[in-house]
Image (cartoon, coloured by chain):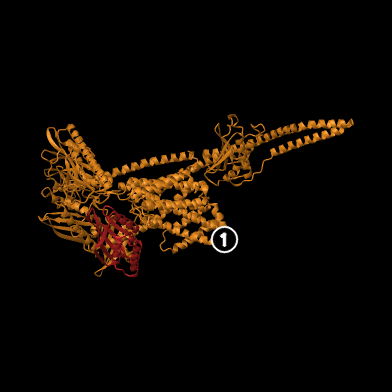
Chain colours: A orange, B red
Amino acid sequence: MRVFRDKIILVAVLLFSLGFVLTLFSSGNASESSLKSYSENVSKKIQDDFNSKTAELNRQLNEIKDKINAASETNVKPFFTILNSFGLKNIRLSVRDSSGKILAWNKNFSLLQSEKNKPNNIFRGKPFIEDRELYTLLSLKSSFVFKGKKYSIKISDVLEKKFSLHNKYANDVSFKKNLEKKYNVKLLIAYKKTNRIPNFINSFKLKTINGADFIPVIYILNVSNSSPPVYLFSMFFFLFGGIIFIFRFSGAATEYLPEKIAALLTALFILIFRILIFYIFNDFTNLKGAFTNPANFSSSFAWGLCSTPVSLFMTTLAGLAIAVILLRIISSDETKIFLSKTSKKILPVFAIIILILFLLLLRGFGASMRSMLFDSNIKLFNPRLAIFNEITLFHIFTILLVALTFIISLYALQLLLFTIADFFFSTKKRANAVILTLALFAIALFFHFLERAPQTQIYVKFLLIFFLGHIIFWDYFNKQNLLRSSFIILVAASLFSTAVLQRQNKDLENALFKLISDKLANPNIFYFDELARTAANEITDKLERERLPISDAEVYSLWSGSFLPREAYSSFISIKKDSNKTAAFYYNWRKENTPPDITSKKDKAEISIPVIINEKRILIKTGISWSDENIFSPSEPEFFITKKLAINSYLPAKNFLLFIFKDGKPIYNSHNISISNKLSQSMLERAKVKKRRIFDVRINGRNYICYPVIKNRDGHEIVSLYTKEALAPLTFVFENLKIFFAQFIFSLILIFLLFAYKRRDYKLRFTFRSALFILLLLTSIVPMILLAGYFRDLSDSKNLNSTSYKLRKRALQVEKYLSNHLAENDVAKIITDAKRDLKIEFSIFSDGRLLGSTHQRFFDCGIISSFLNPEIVDFIGRSGLTEKLIKENIEKYDFNSFYKSASFGNKRIIISVNDAFNPILLPMSERELDIVLITIYSFAFILIILIGLFLINRITSPLQQLVEGTRRIAHGELDYKLDIKTFGELQDLINGFNLMSRKLKASQEKLISAEREAAWREMAKQVAHEIKNPLTPMKLSVQQLMAAYKDDSPKFPKYFEKVTSSLLSQIELLSNIASEFSAFGKMPKINLEKINLVELLNELKPVFSDSEFSIEINSGINPVFINSDKEYLGRVIVNFIRNAKESGARNVLFTISEKENSVALEIKNDGAEIPEEIKDKIFERSFTTKPDGMGIGLYLSKRFLEQSGGSVELLRSDKAETIFELQFN
Amino acid sequence: MKKTLIIFFAVFSLARLSLAQPSPKQVIKEIEFAFNHNVKLLSDDFYFKTYLSISNYQEGYFSPSQSSQIIASFLSSLPKYDFEITNFSSQNNLAYLSAKIKFHKNSSENNKRVFITLKYIDNFWQITQVTFN
């Protein structure tokens, strides 16, 4: 529990708990009074929003009026220019003369035929609501005088759009939905009087700025109970606290607990934290968005812990962290010790369990990749998707992490297996290593054939086992090269996952293709009957509540709001009124005879319901068609094809081909593709053999996949072949590359994050190699980008020219046709005939309005404005030119339109031909070019990085070795020689270096020899001098003794005793001198061993610590192993402590830090400063500042550390502190 | 309550397994029960890719896990409701049912229509499409 006294852990626990407590306040039912108060607040805000919308309209209107007043022209031409100079989204502008005739309009303006007679002079000067057939508008009207004439101007903003295109081109607009999203409420906005008043919390009438009452009444029906800010805060505190806790705990716990227990506890906390997020926050599903949407990914795996993309991501992160922790435990020395102590009888059982786990994980890897595709709607392999969106990128990132988790887990298990094998065989030998790897693969292969449906390809298993074997035996995954080995593992995870994904994707594609083909072959006809009936009933209900539709546009709006566009390929609604007037809308419906019912399927469901509404007799008809022709060759233009159909949501049905054979003879070919009889018969035969299985077929040089459906009808055999083009192999490569590229970038980001986390272990240096690499990237990528831009522009320009040419040609054909049929008065008939004869879709405008069109119903329904594009009016009016190609759009669908001025009898007309209704086949569309460019450039980018790294390594490797050589030479290794074969100046440099080292060695030897001689001389002198000193008194004493003896002196015995005593004393002195010289000449023998530095310091600490002198040890890691002589190092450290104490220090702090290849021990004391002038001398022999010192302690310490491969230096010494740093390599 | 649900569902499942060619009515009952209690009970009854079409919510092909999650999530946004089958029909290996989801909102009764199509595949009736209007 001591770990919980850590301040950071305590703060993290507090934050975590605060987050949890806040969740209790973030939900729950709000009281009635608070709902009322919130809704009143919302009412005010909505009124403010409305006021600012109105004020903005007013501002724009005045700005336009000012511009018109400032115009110099005398006619109405500037009106078009000015109205269209405002690029206002959804804003409609029109100018009328005093008679009400529309003189000018902007691009967004439209007016249906049925709306033309509506009153036009209401609410002048004040905002008003226009409830149109397809739109609800907020409008402002004003008048102005221009060159003496009075005009009126109207500006309108779309509040609600009453229809949708039901595809990606839709630009749905809703003031109501925006408000609901903004204020988290449910609203009902009554733009007109309504009898259907629901129960509501609050209602209010919108008011204008100038106080005039408005029709729109806003009812606030419901207010969301959740309190987003509190929820967000609680989530933030919970997550932040939890993450900080885990990170801190994993580091701090090792100080109080055995390392492995701390690691296991960390893994347990990670797991608990992940589960708590699920139970407390429901994996943030309250935050609506792509990342929490199960539609993007949801798996039932792990009891709901992978139910959304974010859930999966969090579970994967937790799994990855646990896998890394387990790997660290498995790869530790303790595990080896534990296994060595385990009985050899138990080890094989243990190995079998690990092996089973390994095989299951191998299968799990494939299964998880399958789930990534099958449980997701994100199409990873989608040639149409040039650039990934954010959710796809997130999914790809998660896939990388999942693969990484599996590979690390597999690596840990394989390592454990091989460690166990180590006790039975010697795996150190390469041959044994290969045999073990092969044996493991053989077992995996056997298991593969036992599997019911193998999820991972056998070649992937083979490569994976060999890859893991390789990194185990060659010890790639080690601490010293963590960044490099992590990158290798990440790239491997990316490659293996992409390989598995590709195969799973093919399975999914085929399964979906079969599913769709079956759906087409066997439509649920009763279901369609029911749908048609339900649609008719719902329309009846709606009409009874609201007014009767009077136009096709209103019926189109009804159709768009029903489920028909979501369910049926072809459908219609028609409403026949008393007066025999029929308002109707047909979608992809061929009124002409459909092909014969050859596939034994009923292909139409039509329902008629006669009703009486407002005493009027009405006949409501709805219809659904499922005919093959409608499905495979839709008559609707691209922008109008609903993508939300059962078939189109997977693949546009028009991309399917259908061949039908009756009794062996081809009777239907959906796209009239010409195929030979031989191929036709071959396809038929294979269909009969394959029955309901997909087979490949090659048609006109392209690869297709084919799914046969065989039926028997009235004794006739009907074979339907549903066919779709297969992805080209090259496309597969491109698609794989795209995923790999994204994962490659993610891998680089992860490596950067790892580097940031472990930054203390690495020295960040801007090396010559990195400079070269950056230079290479810049010089290769910048031209690549410029080149891509150039290609893009070139292709766009060529496409535009080609489109312009083809559209112009069609316009000329139409012009010629019209001039040849001038005699006919019926314009509508001429247009219909022209379409039939020329097969061209076109429109004709006269006096700025539509005269007629081959696709008249799009104008009648209000999808396209019947007013001529004002840009054309302005252009022809100003320039006098007769033709122009411009870009236009229907909602978000962009297309090219060619306008040509022509004569039609006495009328000036403008012919319009566009590529929305006349598809033009281009060699390469913008999208296709984007795909090609992006894929090629991503491939090039990866190649540049890989080849660049290889070349730069080749260039800089000799330089790095030179640096290393220089370092070694500097450390006295003059024998060091570079053995590199390179070229040019680099080879000269290497040769020069080797010559230099040889010469240095020779001169050093000479120097040593000279030094040795000098030293011997000095030594001899010193020895002679030292010996001479006692010899003189010895000689004198002996002479005295001899004189006494000769003289037969009575004092001889006394002299004898004195002289012998003196002689003995002098001989002792000589012996001491000899011992001292001998000791100085000798070097201690160093015994290097693996010692724990922290343990050594802890042993020494109590020796010196007392109440007046303290020693502290600061180490984030324990144990810290170094190679040294424990006894000698102890003496060195003691010497430093003693020196510190003698210099008056009261505190000594030892700080240990691990670096990339070394351990540093910093010794800091607060003793006296070492004077600047002696800092360089303190490590010299015989240098001392102590009166009784010999000047040998620091000298010997330095000598010992250097001999054991380390170093010592004085980092700093000032009045505050003195710091020494000892390095151990 | 949870225990009762599990027993009820287990009985249904056993009943299905015990019949060689079960009637789609068995599945229909399961669907009705699941929609009224916990739609996630249906996760085994969805085809490997079920087409979901939920107005203003989701459209497309979804896996069984996704389908049950999406429908459960959509239904949880509704007030307390009753799921009532209004029509059912089957022929050969195809079946469909239409149903009404009735709920009270703001003191007025509201309805949502549900269409479910089924197909007899691999000896089981599997849900191939769910449409909410």
Q: Is residue A628 left or right of residue A940?
A: left
* Residue B77 in the image, given as x and y percentages of width and height: 29, 53
Residue closer to the observer: A912 or A741 = A741
Q: Quadrant of residue A91?
A: top left
Residue A1034 visible in the displayed image: yes
Could you say where residue A999 lies in the image, as x and y percent from the top left?
61, 36
Q: In the displayed structure, does residue A790 sit left or right of residue A1223?
A: left
Looking at the rendering, which quadrant does residue A545 occupy? bottom left
Of residues A870 and A616, the one nearer the viewer is: A616
Q: Please provide percent x and percent y for residue A388.
A: 35, 48
Is A714 situated left or right of A1130 in this image? left
Q: How crowded is the residue under tag 1: few (<14 C-alpha within 10 Å), some, or many (20+)?
A: some
Q: Residue furthest right?
A: A1048
Residue B11 x/y as whole percent: 34, 67
Q: Count the marks: how many?
A: 1
Q: Is residue A551 above or below residue A717?
A: above
Please state which amino acid type lies under the numbered disc 1. Lys
Q: Is residue A736 visible?
A: no
Q: Quadrant of residue B97?
A: bottom left
> In the rendered view, would you say A924 is above or below A697?
above
Q: Nearer the viewer, residue A633 or B85?
A: B85
Q: Quadrant of the C terminus of chain A?
A: top right
Give the SS element for disc 1: loop
Q: Which residue is mark 1?
A: A344
Q: Disc 1: which chain?
A: A
